[in-house]
Every structure is written in structure tokens, then in C-alpha cells.
Amino acid sequence: MFGLLSVAALLATLHHGGAIPLEERQSSSMYTYVNLASNTGTSVHRASGILYGVPNAQGQIPSSFYTGMGFNYLSAGGAQDPSYTGWIYGGYTGRMADVVSNYKTARTYGAQFILKLSDLWGADGTQDNSNAIWPDDNSSWTEYDRFLAQVVSDLKANSMTSNIKILIWNEPDLSGTFWNVGMSRYLDTWSHTVKYFRTNLAGVPLAGPAFANGPSSSNTWWTSFLTRVKADGTAPDVYTWHLEGGKSNSLSDLATTQPNMVSLLNSYGMAIPEFVIDEYGTSPEEVPGGSAWWISRFERYNMYGLRGNWYSQAQLHDFLAGLLGKTNVNSATGTGYYANGDWNVYYYYATTMVGHRVATTGSTDGLMDCYAVVDSSVVRILVGGRETTGTYELVINNISSLGLATSGTITVHTYQFSWGGAFVAESKTDLGTVAHTYSSNTLSFPIYQTDTTTTWAFEFPY
């Protein structure tokens, strides 16, 4: 098992003066930095949202798992419920019941809710595109307006007009998956839906476009969307897009897409409202290392993010989007839940990393990052790699901002977060403490990332 020997022995080697020169251990692209002198505000755990993952039965998952991972955002719409198929197949009532239940669960824990409207319609990836009904079929909005009217009625009847955002359509740019009638029809549907809701459900924020591909000036879905919404006054209240393209796709990283979105809106002369990533992370990234990497990104860019969900059918509505297992994972109503290794990362993030955030910088290869907080007496740093291996360096600058000398010794406590699988119960591992010498107002030590899943947290008092 990686970590217990390699990290502890490594830190002891550094302490006793046997460190290998940095240039012999890794390239200049493999450093991640903490600036203790730069206070970036209080954390509200922006990465603690989930896509689906909540059973329809209230209380099925014990409350400690919600509060422990900092649950603060839920997106759902009853997708792929095997018992109910959505409006176009006569299964709307059951799906809306799912939505009402999920909304109640979200509000129980103070979480915000995003309603996926296309799920209620029945476009959830399981529809038969050879006979599916789409908005404005036969140049008529009649059926779609009946649907919208029912949604408005049900949201009002269930007191669901606050702490909710309506996401108009999910990933219309993935042709044939959730939308199958082209860009022009999508843009017409967007405009029609926004105008309908702003007339009949005024004050409820509308979100989108929820494209699968991140914002880019070379993407015609994005440029056509912004051209249209500016022209007819239907810009979303909240811009959303997805980051599930994997580490080799630069448009699946906030470091690229957040500045891109700002630049695009500026180029169109449009307002810059809130951005929310309502789906983030591929399945291989939903492990301790990958989750810590995503946490670092969302905290740096001050954006809320919801974990992607790679289950289907009944399992889609369970396990808090891959953070839990249970005794019988094939039972939709079964209990006996336990935390896997990834939940432990979110638990540490939400419950232990308190105080104020400090500025961090990810490695220039884009694959290692860190998130750091300072409370009244302890510094805590969570590192995370995005499907990467190799030797990285954690560099902690401006030690004196804590009231410490610019050189001396600091005792660092290390915790390891391991991954045995989604349905394997795990706890974090205490690797103990090691005393480090430091100088020039900087403490640094390497991170030996020998697998693509494990990660660590480092703590030291001051």
C-alpha cells in the first residue's frame, strides 16, 4: 500500500538532511504553491454539491452522511427512474414526485436545488429518438406549453419557488443523447421557455445552457447561444456548463473555462452573473486525489460545483453520487450505508478545513493542486492529483505571516486518503508527524504520487 512508508520515510529523510535536489526529482511544471500571507476569504465548501444521488425515500441515507460531506447543492429531475418515464411517455407525475422529495431533502440540509427540466420532459438519455416528442414539433408549442404550465402549477403547489434554479435543458450540444432536433430548435426552445417562466414564474432563477462542452469562442453552440440570448433578452440568470471531458481536454478545467466565459460575455457586451458547474469530474476522477484536485479548483475560482454521477437507473438516485456504499448495492430501498475513501476527502474538507482560505497555485502541468486554510492555531493543506503519477513539490511560502520566524523547524501531521473502490468502506489513515527544517520563509517537501487515486492532507500548528 502506498503512502505509509513512502511519505513518512520521505519526510524523515528531508528532516535529516538527505534531500535530493529538487531539479533531480521533478520538472519545473510539477510544483504547487501555498501563499500563507494572502487571505482569500472564508470557505463555504463550494465543491460539495452533487448530481442526483439522493433516494426518493426521505431519510433513507442517514443525516450524518449529508452533513459530513458539506452537502449544499443538488441537481435532479427524476432521470432514468425505471418506474416513471417523464411527460412525453405519460410518466410525469411520478417524476415530479421524485423532484418534490429531492427538493425537500435538499432544503432539510440547507442545500440549493437545480431542477433539470428536460428530465421531467423525458429526455434523459433513455428516450427513443425515433418516436420521442420534442418542443415545437410540427411548428406547434401547444404540447410543450401544457407541460410548462403543469410544472409551474406543481412548483407553486409544493412551495418550491425559493432556493431553486430551473435548468432549461441538459447537454443539448450532445446530439442524440438529450436533444435530437438540432441547434436552431434548441435556441427557439430556450427563448420560448425563458419567456414563459419569466412571465409565469417570475423571480425564479433560470440556469443554462448546461452544455457538455466548455465555453470557447470557437464553439458555435456557445457563440450562437450568446448571440441569440443577447438579441431577444433571454440570457440565463446563472450560466452553467459541464466539466467532464477528462484531463486531456483543456475545456474541462476551470483554469480555462472560467476566464473563457468571462471573455465571451465581455466580447458580447453582456453582464457577468453567477457561474455554476452543475456537473464536474469523470468517473476515474471521482477518487480521493481527483476530488481534492477539483476542490482546489472550485475554491480558487469561487464557483459552486456539483459532482458528476456515473451510475444509471435506480443507482443514479443513491450513494450521494459515488461517495457511499451500502450492504446491498443493488437494492434501491436498502440501507446499511458506509463511507468510501472519497467521502472521507469531502468530510475532511467540510468539517476540518475551517478558518480562512489562503491563495494557492496549481502545478503548471495542470495535474496537481492544493487547497489551504488557516484557523486560529493550525494550517491545513489538502493536495490532489488529477489522474497523475510522479514526484510533485508542495511549496509553502510566507511562513512569517503566521507570526513564526523565517527559518526554523515545523512539525507536520500527515493524513492519507486511500481508495479501494466505490463500494469499499474506508477511513483516513493517520501517518503521524515529522519535524521539518525550513528557511528563507519557505517550507517545501515532495509528494510522491505513485498511483492515480491516493491523496493527503498536511497540518501544522503555529
Image (spheres, rainbow, N blue to C red):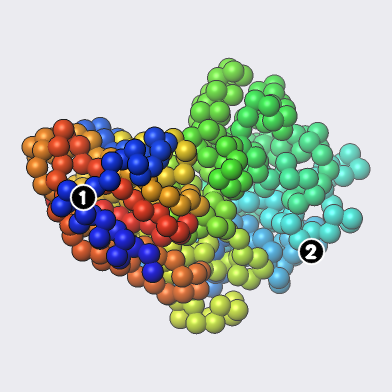
For the N terminus, the image quarter is bottom left
Give the percent coordinates (x, y) of residue 112. Answer: 47, 51
Residue annotated with mark 2? 90
Between 136 and 370, the residue placed more toward the observer is 370
Give the percent coordinates (x, y) of residue 461. Answer: 14, 51
Give the percent coordinates (x, y) of residue 265. Answer: 57, 23
Q: Secondary structure at mark 2?
A: loop
Which corner quadrant of the image does residue 233 belong to? top right
Nearest-to-viewer mark from 1 and 2: 1
Specify which label sits upstream in the sequence, 1 or 2: 1
Left or right of residue 128, residue 452 in this image: left
- Tell me which residue sits at (45%, 59%) in the image: 451
Left or right of residue 99, residue 369 in this image: left
Q: Residues within 10 Å of mark 2 (few under 14, many from 20)?
A: few
Q: Is residue 191 above or below residue 122?
A: above
Q: Amino acid at mark 2?
A: Gly
- Tell me which residue sits at (67%, 36%) in the image: 194
Q: Is residue 275 above or below residue 19?
A: above
Residue annotated with mark 1? 18
How far apart are the two marked residues, 1 and 2, measured between alpha carbons? 70 Å
